[in-house]
Amino acid sequence: MTSPGKRRKQDNIWWSLLWIAPAVILLLIFFIYPLVMTIVFSFQNADSTRFVGLKNYQVIFTDPGMLEVLKNNLLWLILGTILTVGLGLVIAVMIDRVKIESIIKSALFVPMAISFVCAGVIWRLVYLYNPPGQPQSGLFNAILTFFNIPTQVWLINPMFNNFALILVYTWMWTGFCMVIISGALKNIPDDIIEAAKIDGANRFTLFWYIIVPMVRPTIAVVATTMIINILKIFDVVYVMTGGNYHTNVVGMEFYNQLFNFQNYGLASALAILLFLAITPIMYVNIRRMRAEEVTR
Amino acid sequence: MARVQFEHVYKRFNKTEVVHDINLDIKDKEFLVLVGPSGCGKSTCLRMVAGLEEVSEGAIYIGDRPVNDVAPQERDIAMVFQNYALYPHMTVFDNMAFSLKLHHTPGHEIKKRVEQVAEMLGLEPFLKRKPKALSGGQRQRVALGRAIVREPQVFLMDEPLSNLDAKLRVETRANIIRLYQRLQTTIIYVTHDQTEAMTMGTRIAVLNGGIIQQIGTPQELYDHPSNLFVAGFIGSPAMNFLDEAKVVSDEHGTSIMIEGMGYIKIPSLYVEQAKAATGKQLTFGIRPEHLEDATLLPSDAQSGSTLAASVDVVEYLGSELLVYLNIAGKTMQARLDPRSDAHAGGQLTLYVNTAHIHLFETETGKAIF
């Protein structure tokens, strides 16, 4: 015979299993199963009829086209993160406790409400290039023409086009970074800023030694969010260049392999690579968020 | 080391004037306390010296230099904040060293000075800790240390003790006095607590409603308050006031007649001033410690001025009796010798020590003596 205490404990276990069952089942069907299948596909050939070992991964790390994809993604990762987080931080500090703060914030946040596709269309107009002899209706080229500087084919010239795309992303996400960091700035007590001023801090030293360290946890959360976003970047590239003219990125190439070339093996390998790259950052991000909740 | 002067200083926030025409000359090496109830403008005055608030009108000088347009970082002052305002991401050492680093003091010099001050304040064991890992009292000492390390011309302290518990507050109060004696620097100290003001200040400026009510040594404020506000604010328990008093002169001399209570004889020293106030509505003031149970005094003293009172509550404090009295419908407090047999519900004849009586104009609050 089981004692009542033991019995109750067993009941508890059954109850808890019952409560988490829906989540576990959904997770299995919609996350674990596809993940396992993707891993399996990534070791198979284009139409998933034969195992090819690590061949797909080998292609990714040796094929010149693929290496360019990785290189572009790395450029995106570094520049995109630095620009969005850096600008977000600098703007947040500059407009903090300024009268028109909320107006500027709203203005910078608006792009967030626009879909990537719409943003792509807007920025195609900004980058628009017309052949010589015709008026330049694209914003950038119109400005260049005004100052008598030779016009550029922004989205095709491989010297600029990756930067042009990253700029679009920056335009969309700086507002988000700024608003989150601005919230953290509001949590810095006034008297700490005042104490630092009396201690002799000027604007720069105040920013660097007091403000940045005090919002560092928030910056880390925002930065990891940006990194994850950028690793998966697809829409901007798809709408504006379609990955042509040396602007291809992993997300774009994954789409090409899957829908244009029907190469399930290579597409799955790319997806797994992205997954592997994102997981540790996601882990850090979640831990940071928890840590921040604790300090609040 | 420097003198700090306020010259006709006004402060307005939008249209609200919170500080009116402050004139104050704080001498070199003086410990000046700005005291007053909350919202009286004392912190605003301090923050104007620090440069954290702009001066709307008038001028502030630190060591003969006008500082109205000088940024806080260039004023050579140090400030201790009510909430300490320690940098949470820095260790105690770095908190104290921060300003020296910003002023490009060489590393070994920083180390020497921080360690010296840490020793002075008993902070050596905590130098590597972050503020989060310190108790309130320790944080408070770090805040003091951060100010001392800089060797500034002027120390500004904004209610530095108000976040400490009662015991620690008394301890720290003594520590700050010791530090002041050792450092010999000008200190401007803001508090709402008259006990702190009385115990610490070499001079006290009492503020109310953005106006300086009186400036003087603790003794001057206690003995000769210049108006009803100062008289009621300084001293604990507070001074008793009885309005509806009048000056009357007859063949026995000049005395104060309090409606329904009796006569208080005016000492000869004050007779002239009192006579000048004849006919005015007056308020009579006497501190609780200047009342005594008449039965405990030699019989010839009993012939002086007395008041008959009924006793409401008696608090026995060991060294004294704190008695709440009712005199003709007015409540008063008296600190009596513990030998007094005053008891709740009983009657008591109070002897008034007329050497310490005060008289004010009821309408303006101004002191007559």
Image (spheres, coloured by chain):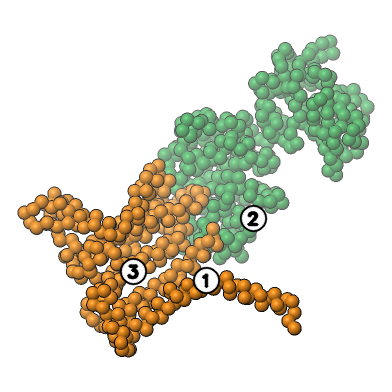
Query: Residue A177 location, x and y as percent?
Result: 38, 57
| Colour-to-chain, green | B
Location of mark 2 (residue) = B137
Q: Tell me residue A114's x, y (percent).
A: 32, 55
Count of marks placed on residues? 3
Q: Is residue A168 shown to the viewer in this render?
A: no
Distance between the Cα atoms at labels 2 and 3?
51 Å
At x 57%, y 45%, the residue is B157
Frontmost of labels 2 and 3 is: 3
Q: Which mark is residue A22?
A: 1
Contact between labelled residues 2 and 1, with CB atoms less than 8 Å apart: no
Relative to residue A83, is residue A33 depicted above or below? below
Q: Residue at x 17, y 65 (%)?
A: A156
Q: Earlier in the sequence, mark 3 or mark 1?
A: 1
Q: Position of residue B203 (x, y in %)?
A: 63, 37
Taking the image as shown, residue A201 lies to the left or right of residue B308, namely left
Is residue A254 depicted above or below B141 in this figure? below
Secondary structure of the residue carrying tag 2 is: helix
Say yes or no: labels 2 and 3 on the same chain: no
Q: Amino acid type of disc 2? A: Gly
Name the subunit of mark 2: B
